[in-house]
Image (spheres, grey):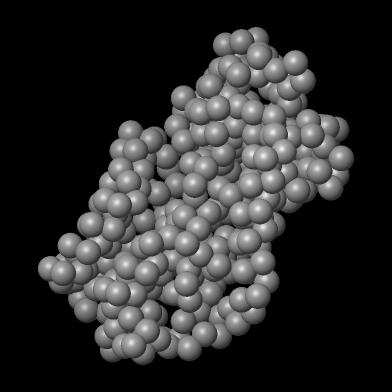
Amino acid sequence: MSARLPGPAAAASRRATANRLSSRRTLSHDYGTGTRLDDAGGIMATAAPRPGTPVGLALVRDAEVLGAEPFFHEFIAGIERILVPLGVPVLLQVVATVAQAGDRMRAWAQHGQVQGMILIDLLPDDERVALVRRLRMPTVVIGDPVTAGGLPTVWTQDDVAMRDVVTALVRGGHTHLGHVAGPAQMAHTIIRRGTFETAAASLGARTTSFDGDYSEAAGVRAVASLAALTQRPTALVFDNDVMALGALHEAARRGLAVPDDLSLVAWDDSALCQLAAPPLSAVSHDVQELGELVGHTLADALAGAPTATVNAPPARLTVRGSSR
């Protein structure tokens, strides 16, 4: 992980990518009304989900980080709440790279081991989107519709939530904000960071960016790196709860009072946030409900329903003792 005051080239590059994604989103005006893809489009649907055959999720994650991260436990529970009564289990495979995910997806399809797939944490222009089309595999994307290539999508509107967080912190008196991101290549990271920087600039606040990997250690390193900055942020926004918890522990170790010296905000509220001391402010939405939306959307895709984009209920900032 690195900390940096965004230089002109780096900031411009991030803004360009974020703007490209935003422009695609603006031009894609037919969300929720798309048409069924025929065989020539590369997607093959059955009349209904086939009981006994799973759907596959090849998840690119460090296994240790995944074990500590509540999000996916709740997310998969929500998917299963919809699909298991239909006789469709979820097959999860944790892999280290996007290439390995693609290999696993090809193997599943070639051996008839799954009847559908779930894509999450996509990159801009992600090769996995084209892959599922070639495999003729019903698939649902969790992420910004502009990354989905016309596939059914469930979207949490991260840009809206990030603007709300930045606005709340600036209104609380913060003039210098930090963002501790997830993996920098992911499309939703690019969108969050681009929105963070743009929203802060529009309100007259300075920003510092930190690269992270969703691990507790990344949060520790972010707080430790503040000592090297002559002008440091007074509030940090984290892309998950585990990094925020690591930052909270490191702040206490260094004698930084939270929130008086440093405010902390996590993404994706969880029991970890609620039980921390002080409790962590967090971007809050019902993760199991998100999983249920994915389950419904995938069941529809398996049955050959028209392609749709489903907007999840908007996330909200839940303010607790870690921020002002």
Looking at the picture, does residue 57 appear above or below residue 61? below
The answer to whether one can see residue 272 in this image is no
Residue 149, above or below 182: below
Count the marks: 0
| Residue 22 place in picture, x, y as percent | 66, 63
Q: Is residue 214 left or right of residue 116?
A: right
Q: Where's residue 69, x and y in %?
A: 42, 39
| Image quadrant containing the C terminus | top right
Quick one: 19 or 53, which is closer to the camera? 19
Indicate left or right for 48 with 4 as reference.
left
User: Which residue occupies the extreme left position in the image?
Assistant: 111
Q: Residue at x 75, y 48 (%)?
A: 198
- Which is more toward the observer, 39 or 214? 39
Residue under the point 23% across and 57% down: 103
Q: Nearer the viewer, residue 223 or 80?
A: 223
Whether residue 150 is visible: yes
- Quick one: which residue is furthest to the front in this view? 9
Left or right: residue 32 versus residue 257 is left
Q: Residue at x 48, y 41 (%)?
A: 183
Residue 251, quarter of picture: top right
Residue 217: x and y in percent read 46, 25
On screen, residue 23 versus residue 36, left or right, reads right
Where is residue 42 shown, x and y percent of the image? Answer: 33, 81
Give me the residue at 69% from left, 34% from top.
Answer: 6
